[in-house]
Image (cartoon, rainbow, N blue to C red):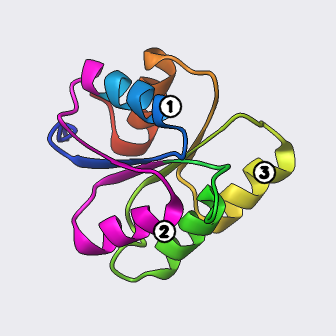
Amino acid sequence: MAVDMGLNILIVDDYKTMLRIVENLLKQLGFTNVYQATDGSMALKMLRDGAFGLIISDWNMEPMTGLQLLKEVRADRKLNTVPFIMVTAESKVENVAAAKEAGVNNYIVKPFNAETLKQKLSAVLGAF
């Protein structure tokens, strides 16, 4: 089954430069519908109002962290099957374990490039 390159993707990061970088990488890979949220609560509202096929979220954000967002998404019957990739600058074992326990689909450690992103997306969405 081919990956839908028109899939609605929500990227969440409180750092606007990182949002731009991830959006550009996704567009380089061929994805066309990329949306941005600057914090977890904004993302949650967008997710509840729209239809998204993937969430890529930073871990460290205020006032709602990526982990809190993940838990909210997994607790919501309408959203709990949406693939979720966590992005973080820290690769601490306890963070990876907490994200896995909360239901994350994959994990990316910053800094990363288009190839790393493609590998993680392929693991979550299928090869493209």
Label 3: how many Cα within 10 Å (few below 14, some 14–19, many 20+): some
Q: CA distance from mark 2 to mark 1?
A: 18 Å
Residue 47, picture quadrant: bottom left
Q: Residue tagged by mark 2? A: 41
Query: Residue 18 — which label?
Result: 1
Residue 3, relative to residue 86: is it above or below? above
Q: Residues within 10 Å of mark 2 (few under 14, many from 20)?
A: some
Q: Earlier in the sequence, mark 2 or mark 1?
A: 1
Please give left or right for residue 16 compared with residue 64 in the image: left
Query: Cβ–Cβ below 8 Å for labels 3 and 1?
Result: no
Q: At 74% from the left edge and 48% from the top edge, which residue is drawn?
A: 96
Instruction: From the image, tell me which residue sits under label 3.
Output: 95
Task: Work out whether mark 3 precedes mark 1 in sequence or the reverse, and give the earlier one.
Answer: 1
11 and 70: which is toward the camera: 11
Amino acid type of the residue tagged 2 in the rendering: Ser
On screen, 50 above or below 32? below
Viewer-side label of 3, 2 = 2
User: Relative to residue 47, is residue 115 drawn left or right?
Assistant: right
Disc 3 marks a residue whose amino acid type is Asn
Considering the numbered disc 1 on the image, is that residue within a helix, a strand or a loop?
Answer: helix
Secondary structure at badge 2 equals helix
- What is the span of residues highlighted in magenta in the rendered image? 27-56
Left-right relation of 25 to 60: left
